[in-house]
Image: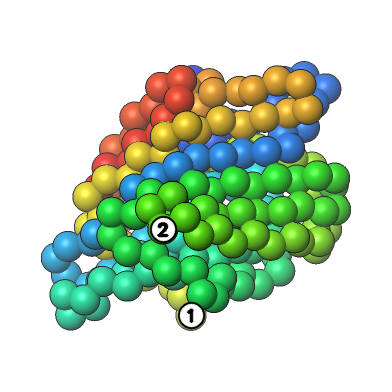
Amino acid sequence: LHDEYSTNWAGVIIESPPSGQNFTTVTGTFVVPSPTGSDGAASAWVGIDGDTASQSILQAGVDFKISGGKVSYDSWYEWYPNYAYDFSNFAISAGNTITITVHSATSTTGTVTLTNKSTGKSVSQSLTAPSSSVSRNAEWIVEDYEQNGSLVTFANFGSVTFSGASASTSSKTVTPNTGIKVNIEQNGKVLTSVTDNSTSVTVKH
């Protein structure tokens, strides 16, 4: 499998499920990083579709931002091309352990769940697809996301490891090391390094 480069995604993408099947659930658990240095932001998320199946992405994740040395966090969900929405009343602090699970029950319905294992709190949202989902791709990604039409400055988040990372169909579970590693390259510089094994994906800044 070849590695790929992207202007905004770093992590692992599984580009197709086992023959004749669709991905129904993708999950991963990570420790919330504390960005350092100059102002910037990044987002860690888990998703279904969005790579080769580019017309939709069912995803949920956590944004981390640093501004003037102050770090803040938001959690969100989205079934692109619909808008992203923030979860409210879901507290996140540096060092918390967060599990993200994205479940596509049918081609038009799905559920996203974030659990903060450090606080015992969980939030969940049922969603309806903006267009029929094909559930062909699974991802564990740290993203340099867009705001107001341009990429935010990519924060130095240290590293994010999605542990317990798996993508399931109705009958099989696929491990992240069967996927393609993607790193962020901007202005000729590679900003991340990605490693994976059968249970985890690590993205280092």
* Residue 130 place in picture, x, y as percent: 80, 63
- Is residue 149 shown left or right of residue 32? right
- Residue, x 42% and y 69% (percent of image)? 91
Q: Is residue 28 visible?
A: yes
- Residue, x 77% and y 32% (percent of image)? 22
Report the Cα–Cα distance between label 2 and label 1: 33 Å
Q: Is residue 42 above or below residue 107?
A: below
Q: Residues within 10 Å of mark 1 (few under 14, many from 20)?
A: few
- Residue, x 61% and y 31% (percent of image)? 167
- Is residue 112 shown left or right of residue 109? left
Q: Is residue 120 above or below residue 87?
A: above
| Residue 49, picture quadrant | top right
Task: Check disc 2 and report its element: helix, strand or loop.
Answer: loop
How many tags in the picture? 2
Q: Is residue 31 above or below residue 3?
A: below
Task: Check disc 1 and report its element: helix, strand or loop.
Answer: loop
* Residue 170 place in picture, x, y as percent: 78, 27
Q: Which amino acid type is marked by label 1?
A: Asn
Residue assigned mark 2: 119
- Residue 148: which numbered mark, if any? 1
- Residue 177: which numbered mark, if any? none
Q: Give the colour scheme shown.
A: rainbow
* Residue 56 place in picture, x, y as percent: 71, 54
- Residue, x 42% and y 39% (percent of image)? 162
